[in-house]
Image (cartoon, rainbow, N blue to C red):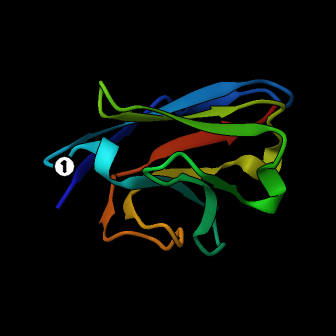
Amino acid sequence: QVHLVESGGGLVQPGGSLRLSCIGSEMPFRDIGVAWYRQGSGKPRELVAAIEHGGRTKYGDSVKGRFTISRDDSRNMVYLSMNNLKPEDTAVYYCNAPVGSDFGAGVSWGQGTQVTVSS
């Protein structure tokens, strides 16, 4: 089972940017897909972005054009670059793996990192 640790969350003003990082251990990222999910207060957990081991990506409709998922397999890391952040992006963001070619959620979750978008 892959162990995941997220970092990079924080408080940002609307229109600002953040980059989240997810580092994994116990399993090489080059062999698996990795996803970012988020859960806002009182809301269900939703897929933000996923990247499968071949490099194909999938994004949630609400973040298309603003967020970018990328990976550095040499460091076993996956990143989520978030631009033009909106208050509705406020949530705890979780890293998830292993994600298959169908982009279904994996069994391993990180502890989450809080992103707050507020003026």
Type of amino acid under label 1: Met
Where residue 106 appears, as percent x and y from the top left, is 37, 69
User: Mark 1 = which residue?
Assistant: 27
Residues 72 and 5: in front is 72
Residue 62 visible in the picture: yes
Q: Residue at x 78, y 35 (%)?
A: 118
In the image, residue 21 above or below residue 25: above
Where residue 7 appears, as percent x and y from the top left, is 41, 32
**Which quadrant of the figure contains the N terminus?**
bottom left
Where residue 8 appears, as percent x and y from the top left, is 49, 28
In the image, residue 70 above or below residue 107: above
Where residue 79 appears, as percent x and y from the top left, is 51, 33
Q: Residue at x 81, y 45 (%)?
A: 87
Q: Residue furthest left?
A: 26
**Which quadrant of the figure contains the C terminus?**
top right
Q: Residue furthest front?
A: 54
Residues 79 and 16: in front is 79
Residue 95 visible in the picture: no
In the image, residue 97 above or below residue 82: below
